[in-house]
Every structure is written in C-alpha cells, then in structure tokens.
Image: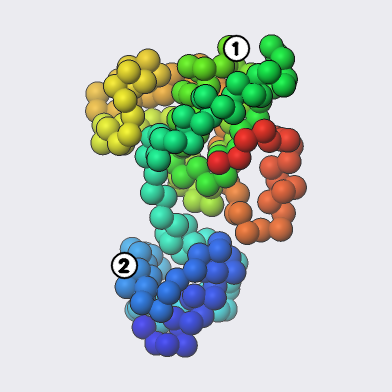
C-alpha cells in the first residue's frame, strides 16, 4: 500500500470511528477490504483510498468502516462486571429506586448483542420484577445491530461463555440455532450509533438517564 494512501486511511478511520491503527497494520486493511474491492471493481486498496478521498461519506465509505470494526464478543465476557452487577450494583439501585423504579443500562459497544443479553440474564436472576430493567445496545456496525435485534445465535456462539443453565433457561433451540426467549428479548433494544460522533448524546438521551454504562 502506498505510504500516502495508508496515512490517509489511518486518519480516516481515526476521525470516523476512533479506530487507531499502528504503522504495522497495513495487512489488516488489506485483508478486510478484499471483498469490497471485488464488489466495487477496485484494483487495490490504493484505489479504494482515493475513492474515499473523493467521497468520504458515501455508501462505500460506510461499508469500509463497518468492515473495519472487529465485533469480537462473547457471553459473560470477563465475568467480573456481571458479578459486580449482580452483587453490588443492582442491589444498590433497587434500594435507591424502590420496588418499581426503572433501571436503565447502556451497552455502548454492543456488537452482536451478547453483552446486553448477559446483562438481561443477570437482571432476570437477581432483580425482582426484572422487566423494569431496560437495556439499550448501540454499535457502529449495522450488520451487528441487525443480528443483535434478531436474538438468534449459532451453536458456536452460545458455546462461547454461556453456561448451560442460562442457555436452557433463556433460549429456545431451533435446529443448530438458539433463539432468545421473548421475555428476555423485550428487555433490550439495539440501535446504530457512532461513539465518536458529536450527535451521539442527542441520539441516546431519550433512552436515559442511564444508571449503568458498559
């Protein structure tokens, strides 16, 4: 990749989605752009970069940004935050808000929804009247948001971090797929959002104020 074009891509990704790429990450751009180059008839990533210079807000630009997001996630990732939610945070909120007080949680980089699902499962097991817990999940990737809203996960996805007890309780099996049960699904909503955009607060404030932010 030409140094000038790689420099532009570094600045473009940082400005648009806050993604900082080191100088040794050219391979990452090349590997993730292969499909888009083919679909848009572009010769190489240099041609792609030049197209983004001309039209930084085009549909192609949005596809590039989506392709560069990692979307790595799993259920109950790092475990401790969910233990703290169950043992410390939810009890304090219940005491402060009373029996019927609404609890708002924001999963700010929710990817395909496993974090928000883990929050909802934790609430269902530890909050009386768990339906009062409302979870907003946001992510830059439109594909990730679409999947999160579907509430459908593959066998491989549910095997990553999800204990069998919660799998059986909160999911219904459909062949090799697992569908989130409606009572848990209605606790969550997922929206597209870019965490580095100035209008972010305006877009999410209608779902707040938030008691917990992941």
Work out whether 136 lies above or below 126: below
Would residue 192 appear left or right of 97 to someone viewing this image? left
Would residue 169 appear left or right of 92 to someone viewing this image? left
Q: Is residue 149 visible?
A: no
- Please state the horizontal and vertical placement of residue 4, each as a whole percent of the image: 47, 88
| Display colour scheme | rainbow
Estimate how packed mark 1 is, as few (under 14), some (14 to 19) or many (20 or more) residues with alpha carbons within 10 Å: few
Q: Using the numbered discs, state the Cα–Cα distance from disc 2 to disc 1 in whole angstroms.
A: 47 Å
Work out whether 140 lies above or below 107: below
Disc 1, SS? loop
- Please state the horizontal and vertical placement of residue 74, each as a whole percent of the image: 37, 39
Q: Is residue 11 visible?
A: yes
> Which quadrant of the rendered structure holds the C terminus?
top right
The quadrant holding residue 131 is top right
Residue for point 39% across, 44% down: 73
Q: Which one is in front, 83 or 188?
A: 83
Which of the two marks, 2 or 1, is nearer to us in this view?
A: 1
The quadrant holding residue 172 is top left
Residue for point 48% across, 82% down: 7
Label 1, on which residue?
Answer: 129
Label 2, on which residue?
Answer: 31
N-terminal of the pair, mark 2 or mark 1, is: 2
Total numbered badges shown on the rendered structure? 2
Disc 2, SS? helix
> Which quadrant of the rendered structure holds the N terminus?
bottom left
Q: Which one is in front, 149 or 39?
A: 149
- Please state the horizontal and vertical placement of residue 3, each as a whole percent of the image: 42, 87
Work out whether 157 lies above or below 102: below
Residue for point 46% across, 45% down: 111
Work out whether 94 lies above or below 28: above
């Amino acid at each position: 990749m030409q140094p000038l074009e790689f420099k532009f891509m570094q600045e473009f990704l940082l400005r648009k989605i806050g993604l900082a790429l080191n100088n040794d990450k050219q391979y990452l751009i090349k590997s993730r752009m292969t499909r888009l180059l083919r679909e848009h008839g572009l010769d190489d990533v240099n041609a792609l970069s030049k197209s983004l210079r001309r039209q930084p807000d085009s549909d192609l630009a949005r596809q590039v940004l989506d392709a560069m997001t990692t979307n790595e996630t799993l259920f109950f990732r790092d475990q401790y935050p969910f233990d703290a939610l169950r043992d410390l945070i939810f009890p304090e909120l219940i005491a402060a808000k009373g029996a019927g007080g609404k609890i708002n949680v924001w999963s700010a980089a929710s990817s395909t929804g496993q974090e928000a699902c883990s929050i909802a499962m934790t609430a269902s097991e530890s909050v009386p009247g768990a339906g009062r817990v409302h979870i907003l999940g946001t992510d830059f990737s439109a594909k990730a948001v679409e999947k999160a809203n579907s509430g459908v996960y593959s066998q491989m996805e549910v095997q990553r971090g999800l204990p069998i007890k919660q799998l059986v309780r909160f999911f219904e099996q459909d062949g090799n797929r697992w569908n989130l049960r409606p009572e848990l699904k209605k606790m969550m909503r997922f929206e597209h959002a870019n965490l580095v955009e100035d209008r972010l607060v305006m877009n999410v404030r209608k779902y707040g104020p938030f008691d917990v932010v992941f």
